[in-house]
Image (spheres, rainbow, N blue to C red):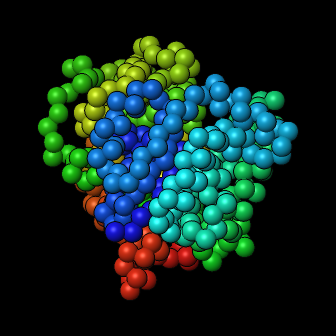
Amino acid sequence: MKELLFLAHRIPYPPNKGDKIRSFYLLKHLSRHFRVHLGAFVDDPDDWKHVEALSGMVSGELKLLPLQAGAAKLRSAKGLFSGEPLTLPYYHDDAMQDWIAHLIAARPIRQAVVFSSAMAQYLEAYPDIGRIVDFVDIDSDKWRQYAERKAWPMNWVYRREARTLLEYERHIAASFAAATFVSSAEAELFKQLAPECAGHVGYYNNGVNLDYFSANWEFDNPYPQGQRTLVFTGAMDYWANVDAVSWFAREVMPALRRRFADLHFYIVGSRPTAEVQTLAGEGITVTGSVPDVRPYIAHAAISVAPLRIARGIQNKVLEAMAMSKPVVVSPQALEGITADTAHELILAEDAAAFIALISAQLTEPDAAIGLAARRCVERLYSWDTSLGRLDALLGVTPEDTGGWTTDGA
């Protein structure tokens, strides 16, 4: 069996948040065809308890190193003086670099997959290896969006990061064998930003575990009797999610509560920041981490995704659609998702539209939207179909050249 090196900026287990879901299924797919050596960082101490489970997925060597946010931020500050993006020193670790050097010297590794731009730095010295970078999203553009919503001096820092990280993303995309993104829309945007790399930029969609996220399961109702509920799911220490629920609580919920006194908004996700916790009160509940988000989706009237900052594909939207739930999304949350906004989900352009469209769905629920949403996900967002696009690129099925595209098709 051929050997492959897989590097990820965050331990790809458990698959309980956006990037970890994608990296988990990518690792699972690679492990079917290669002896995989995995190097990754652990930024949540609670994840160390999952090392044994992860080890069962890795037939080669496993190198996990702790990543402490405080120390990493101090390291990243040197980027202000070196001219490099702050992301690179944040994720640089000499022990990881040494492990990779020893591994490549000792093992017949001819291919490598890098998950996120931050990890590409570890393979810059190995141009003879077939290197693929899964950027997932255009991280530099997220920093640009952050800058638009922050005051000085952070808006200056974020604008600088957007500029310098885009330069690095272009460098990596040009020097690696291929670069992938989470959607055709994301890949097309990067081609516009880096036209010199267009010939080897492609994508594979995120998928959904259709058996796990299904309306066929029976769940106990986590909500009090007599409540109609809206639900938002996601990691609540991620600033884009924090911004989304704060905006929704401030701009949308008061008007909805005046119309529907029994309506309640549940914010479901791990590690809620202090800003999120202050939202809890009349009509709003912040749950913190829950063992299973599915009961909260299954028993909600509507799932909402009012993101104002987003890149790539929102797993929270696909998961709710897979559970046959009506989903009301902002334009930013819809980016990268191919769905009919007239029949498969509901698009709200602004606060007034969120209020009007949610009110209409609460007044006259349309179950057909949820059923159509499920069919959409079944048709377009299975992991086997999505990851199959990588096989030709990796040489798993050399005769199959139809799955991988560089034209966004």
Give the quarter of the image for residue 202. bottom right
Q: Quadrant of the N terminus?
A: bottom left
Q: Residue furthest right?
A: 81
Residue 334: where, in percent of width, then height? 49, 52
Where does residue 372 sit, x and y in percent of width and height?
Answer: 28, 58
Q: Position of residue 293 (x, y in %)?
A: 31, 34
Task: Determine the image quadrant of residue 342.
Answer: bottom left
Q: Position of residue 67 (x, y in %)?
A: 55, 32
- Above or below, 223 against 387 in this view is above
| Residue at 52% from the left image edge and 15% from the top image edge | 278
Task: Point out the residue furthest to the bottom here.
Answer: 399
Which of the two residues, 100 or 395, is positioned nearer the viewer here?
100
* Residue 181 visible to the viewer: no
Residue at (83%, 46%) from the top-left corner? 83
**Between 58 and 334, the one nearer to me in the picture:** 58
369, above or below 230, in the image: below
Q: Is residue 152 above or below residue 386?
A: above
152 sits left or right of 305 in the view: right
How many numbered discs, if any? 0
Q: Is residue 21 visible?
A: yes
> Along the horizontal axis of the image, is 178 left or right of 321?
right
Q: Residue at x 78, y 50 (%)?
A: 163
Q: What residue sits 76% from the left and 33% below the top?
A: 77
